[in-house]
Amino acid sequence: MEESNRPSVSLCSPPRRGSFPNMYRSPHRPSVLLVEDSDDDAFFFDRALRRCQVDCEFTRLENGALALDYLKNALASADGFRRPDVVFLDLKLPAFSGFDILRWIAEQNVRPPLKVVVLSGSEHQGDMDLARALGASDYCVKPISPERLGAEFAPHADASAGPARDSRFTAPREDGA
């Protein structure tokens, strides 16, 4: 695997390149999967994550193929292989688009549903509508603010609760955050 195609993992620290991340769930900390090909956007996401002070396990994957492999393993495993609590998904990715990944997740009929938040630069209503139709829990326009990001973790305050779903789709804020 080429260095640029390797996933990165951190425990709420800056995204970094490395070997396949540790895949076993901590029962007390939410796990966050960011699927984002842009280093700049990943940096701003990580900065917002730190500012909202969420104690989590954070994994970044840089393309759609890595995300599909990761999710296939996570959803098929019965031995604790990491199932993310929240997936933040860019739409425009190498290999497979965010829409392709949403379609695949929908076809799996995952129970409890996987919480997927689209994190995109697109403000097009058509993209928001399609993401909703494909099962996205929320849609946020980049960059995401710490307050907005922190709100995505409210359902995970109780570690015993499974991933939550909601149908809120957030329109872009006028202040750009």
Image (cartoon, rainbow, N blue to C red):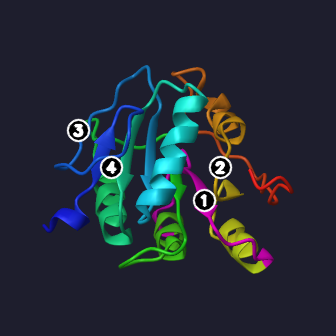
Quadrant location of residue 139?
A: bottom right
Quadrant location of residue 35?
A: bottom left
Residue under numbered circle 4: 74
Q: Which residues are magenta?
A: 107-125
Which residue is rendered at x = 55% and y = 71% of the image? Answer: 91
Q: Residue 94: x, y in percent?
A: 38, 77
Q: Amino acid at mark 4?
A: Ala
| SS assignment at label 1 | strand
Q: Residue 125: x, y in percent?
A: 79, 75
Given this view, does label 1 or label 2 mark the residue nearer the observer?
2
**Marks 1/3: CA distance?**
24 Å
Q: Earlier in the sequence, mark 1 or mark 4?
A: 4
- Local packing at callout 3 (Cα closer than 10 Å; few below 14, some 14-19, many 20+) is few
Q: Earlier in the sequence, mark 1 or mark 3?
A: 3
Q: Amino acid at mark 1?
A: Leu
Residue under numbered circle 2: 144
Tell me the tag on residue 119.
1
Vertical position of residue 67 compared to residue 25: above or below: below
Which residue is rendered at x = 29% and y = 63% of the image? Answer: 69
Work out whether residue 86 can be spotted. no
Residue under numbered circle 3: 22
Given this view, does label 1 or label 4 mark the residue nearer the observer?
1
